[in-house]
Image (cartoon, rainbow, N blue to C red):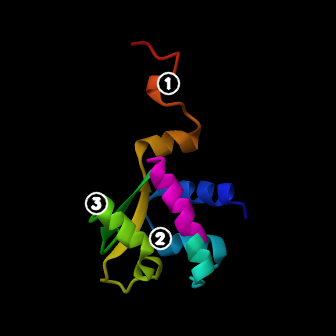
Amino acid sequence: MMDHDIERLVLERAVEDFTGLWELVWEMYGQHRVEPEATAVVRAAVKNLLDRQWVSLFRGRSFAGDQVPLSDDEVDRALESNDSWQAPSPSQEHVRIAATPEGVRAFLGHPRERDDPTRSL
């Protein structure tokens, strides 16, 4: 799988719903296969999407609306932590990804409003 394909799949999952970082690795390399090489590839894709501001990272304990955005410092630490890439226990805090509005537009192929010449002011 090419880097672009991995970024596209990460963005697709982030557009669909909040997705745990470990789930991204499972999606691309097989469930329960969180090996250093696989994690490194997905980590690089997530970093590229973060740099474009197409995704954001959050922390939470359940997928029931409890997510809290990570600060820039927390993002760096979370991406480098092996724990962020492992499936959590049911009540353990974990890191998840979601698309920003800009990321959704990019995924859907829509131009940014300010760049759209057909948009009236």
Residue 116 shows in this picture = yes
Left or right of residue 108, residue 63 in this image:
left
Residue 15 shows in this picture = no
Q: CA distance from mark 3 to mark 1?
A: 28 Å
Residue 115, numbered circle: 1
Q: Which residue is mark 3?
A: 71
First of labels 1, 2 by sequence position:
2
Region of the chain picked out in magenta, as a range: 41-54
What residue is drawn where x is 43% and y is 13%? 120
Q: Position of residue 76 (x, y in %)?
A: 38, 66
Q: Which residue is mark 2?
A: 21
Q: Amino acid at mark 1?
A: Asp
Secondary structure at numbered mark 3: loop
Q: CA distance from mark 2 to mark 3?
A: 17 Å
How crowded pointer 3 is (Cα within 10 Å; few <14, some 14-19, many 20+) is rated as few
Q: Where 7 sits versus 117, above or below?
A: below
